[in-house]
Image (cartoon, grey):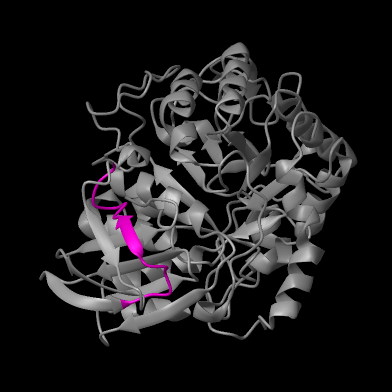
Amino acid sequence: MTRRSHAPRRLLATLTTIATALTLGLVAGAPAAERAEAATPRHGDGDVILNLFQWTWDSVAAECRDVIGPAGFGYVQVSPPMEHIRGTQWWTSYQPVSYRIESKLGTRSEFAAMVAACDAAGVGVIADAVVNHMAGAGQSGTGVAGTEFSDDHFAGTYGAADFNDCRTDISDYTDRYQVQHCRLVSLQDLRTGSGSVRDRIAAYLDDLVSLGVDGFRIDASKHVPASDLEAIKARMRNPGVFWVHEVIGAAGEPIRPSEYLGSGDSHEFEYARRLRHDFDGQIKNLRYIGDGTLPWDRAGVFVDNHDTERNGESMNYRWGAKYVLANTFLLSWPYGSPTVYSGYEFSDTDAGAPGATATSVPDATCGAGRWTCTQRWTEIRGMVGFHNAVSGTEVTNWWDDGDNLVAYGRGAKGYVVLNNTGSTVQRSFQTSLPAGTYCDVVAAADCSVQRTVDGDGWFTASIPAYGALAIHVGARA
């Protein structure tokens, strides 16, 4: 890392985190409600990641300045910054043609300007990195920046010897060899066991770091042997740069997210599945979310992402108020590193960003069109502030009604109530907060809705149907 040390410190802090956990008696089998939050380093005001899916570099730059930085997000995750095939569909961004920083989301100079603008706003940049494969077999032509390609030839980047020998699609996900050496939906699978391929990928990542990128989401990590990814990272000029892996763990499959912790964190897809299940059932069960899965300080967690919102594996924006509640929980619960997703409305799951052409995407427009702009919602912005204010505290004062009304504190710094029912609920709640008048940060951005805690830590409030309440010591009247 040449410009910042925040993201690398997260990986270097592992031993410190373990030592702290031992000191606090936070054993691996303890319920999540009894654990302290992971001690992840903050960037700017915080460590929450915002995933701006298919936003242009110019749009990201403006949003960092006007919204993301002021809201307290620590990082913004951007879509893959490399040349890819032509097409309007979103998934064309995940079919590389070359490692030139030229795509339908913008030019290299626009990307560099975006990183600088986000840095000035106190926001780090995490790039979605596609390193498992190149464009699909059977395709040929030129990429969005003019690079020629065909099955075994990607001009100036790779030739036939750089791809794995298996030339068939994966048919059996219980077969480790197939999953990691054959083609994922016909995509040309890179020979990541090769030294020259490893060097080329490491050079691409180094190039992005030289532009100021803080870390990477490694796409399709499950399809690359964990040892290959460790070898690639070791070849980088700064092998301590932050990585988080996309490893979609599933029952009955041999490849697990925990295998990839040697080179970074892993996304915990089971967390998103659990949110979908419990918000459609009983949210009292959220008290134990994360138990038996990835270590609580190495998991990347989310309500949805660009894949799961389309395939039904998770909740998505169509869940309305329940989706907002799930994000409220995500940002208030001390398990993993949270990513808030912001994409666009769709009816066709292949559809690209609003107004996309084969070679470009218009700048995102919030308040008009189909962009969801989740980061601008009052509840999300309020809960990012909540997350930052309660960092490092344990869950306290858990209460539930045995069904779909839950409440809990974060030490003496914050308190949350979630009402996953169709009726308004009024009752008193016991907190560990100091006496005072607090702003309800999910109800209003201007502190026009207030909650008063008495000297014994109690307050009384009405919680709207499918609504929430959140107060913290950083937002007092």
Magenta residue check for 436: yes
Q: Quadrant of residue 437?
A: bottom left
* Residue 238 vertical placement versus 402 (above, below): above
What is the magenta range?
430-445
The percent coordinates of residue 254 (x first, y second) are: 65, 72
The percent coordinates of residue 12 (x first, y second) are: 80, 54
Closer to the camera in the image, 435 or 391:
435
The structure residue drawn at horizontal position 42% and vertical position 72%, both measured from the top left corner, is 409
Q: Main secondary structure of the magenta part?
A: loop
The percent coordinates of residue 195 (x first, y second) are: 89, 41
The structure residue drawn at horizontal position 15% and vertical position 73%, both measured from the top left corner, is 426
* Residue 357 vertical placement versus 67 (above, below): above
Closer to the camera in the image, 204 or 350:
204
The percent coordinates of residue 269 (x first, y second) are: 50, 63
Residue 314 visible? The answer is no
The structure residue drawn at horizontal position 64% and vertical position 20%, both measured from the top left corner, is 101
Residue 425 visible? The answer is yes
Magenta residue check for 215: no
- How many marks can you see? 0
Relative horizontal placement of residue 115, taking residue 242 as reference (left or right): left
Q: Quadrant of residue 109?
A: top right
Relative horizontal placement of residue 133, taking residue 382 as reference (left or right): right
* Residue 105 vertical placement versus 227 (above, below): above
The quadrant of the image that shows the N terminus is top right
Closer to the camera in the image, 456 or 137:
456
The structure residue drawn at horizontal position 85% and vertical position 35%, both measured from the top left corner, is 199
